Image (cartoon, rainbow, N blue to C red):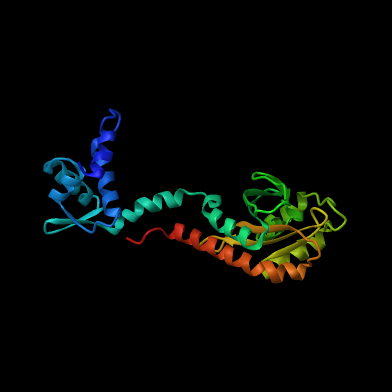
């Protein structure tokens, strides 16, 4: 018995499973392993089913556009990409961004975070830590004041006029450190600069000695949907040092995530 058929044989012993669906999935996996085309008889032999069952299976897949026939041989069509895209499209942003964030954290040896705006706070959706002794202890789901966080500021900078006015009408700009910007006019100027520059640098405004650098993440419609940021112990580094040493890599990572979001939105071309 072929390996694929043996694998499916165990599934057929389960009364709650559909043999036809199991065989259909096994056939798609065969094509996925690089088999370019098969005859009806070859399908029957590979799946360990009768020729009549193989015929019904192939005609069903052909009816739905997943298989094409050329004389006696059947081959897979690009429409099967829809099946993979359905999984891809269902993946959440943190799952899609995780490999890029992990690579960035290891490249720069700094903590990388993904966040979204929720009312007056930036919420951490994902976080990747480098392998080093000193870490910033903030977990996924943590809410931080948007006005004093670099991710929060790039997200606030993307708000339209009414939404931003509403934010300033209700937000309490408390001094978290001596360096925290609490003057509304000064903060608005910072947000305007962040929107123009496409990034924001933070220096000891949320916690003494800690800095942040963030950029917005845009979807295929150029809408800001999240922020990607780095947080680190400043040491002797200045704002200029962070921009010079970290911003290019952060922007490249953001572009990779945005490309993934664009591919998910576009879907397969079939």
In the image, residue 25 lies at what x, y percent?
Answer: 28, 45
Picture quarter with the C terminus: bottom left
12 and 20: which one is in front? 12
Q: Is residue 158 left or right of residue 27?
A: right
124 and 245: which one is in front? 245
36 and 219: which one is in front? 36
In the image, residue 100 lies at what x, y percent?
Answer: 55, 58
Task: Tell me which corner region of the image, top left, top right, bottom left or bottom right, holds residue 160.
Answer: bottom right
Picture residue at 12% right of the left edge, 42% below the top: 52
In the image, residue 108 lies at what x, y percent?
Answer: 65, 62
Q: Is residue 267 left or right of residue 49?
A: right
Which residue is farthest right? 178
105 and 248: which one is in front? 105
Picture quarter with the N terminus: top left
Q: Is residue 233 left or right of residue 7?
A: right
Task: Tell me which corner region of the image, top left, top right, bottom left or bottom right, holds residue 24.
Answer: top left
In the image, residue 60 lies at what x, y percent?
Answer: 20, 46
Which residue is farthest top? 15
Instruction: Let me know if residue 21 appears in the view.
Output: no
Q: Is residue 57 left or right of residue 95?
A: left
Instruction: Let me know if residue 81 appears in the view.
Output: yes
Total numbered labels = 0
Picture residue at 65% right of the left edge, 61% below the top: 158
| Location of residue 244 with respect to 15 vertically, above or below | below
């Amino acid at each position: 018995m072929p390996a694929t058929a043996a694998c499916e044989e165990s599934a057929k012993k389960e009364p709650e499973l559909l043999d036809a669906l199991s065989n259909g999935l096994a056939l798609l996996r065969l094509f996925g392993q690089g088999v370019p085309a098969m005859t009806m008889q070859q399908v029957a032999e590979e799946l360990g089913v009768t020729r009549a069952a193989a015929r019904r299976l192939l005609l069903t897949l052909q009816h739905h556009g997943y298989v094409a026939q050329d004389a006696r041989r059947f081959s897979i069509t690009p429409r099967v990409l829809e099946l993979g895209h359905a999984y891809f499209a269902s993946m959440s942003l943190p799952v899609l961004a995780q490999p890029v964030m992990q690579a960035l954290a290891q490249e720069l040896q700094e903590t990388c975070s993904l966040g979204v705006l929720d009312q007056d706070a930036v919420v951490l959706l994902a976080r990747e830590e480098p392998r080093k002794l000193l870490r910033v202890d903030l977990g996924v789901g943590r809410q931080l004041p948007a006005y004093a966080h670099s991710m929060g500021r790039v997200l606030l900078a993307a708000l339209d006029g009414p939404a931003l006015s509403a934010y300033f009408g209700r937000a309490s700009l408390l001094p978290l450190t001596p360096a925290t910007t609490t003057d509304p006019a000064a903060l608005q100027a910072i947000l305007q600069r962040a929107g123009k520059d496409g990034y924001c640098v933070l220096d000891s405004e949320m916690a003494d000695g800690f800095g942040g650098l963030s950029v917005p993440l845009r979807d295929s419609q150029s809408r800001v949907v999240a922020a990607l940021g780095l947080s680190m112990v400043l040491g002797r580094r200045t704002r200029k040092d962070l921009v010079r040493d970290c911003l290019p890599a952060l922007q490249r990572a953001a572009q990779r995530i945005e490309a993934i979001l664009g591919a998910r939105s576009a879907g397969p071309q079939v």
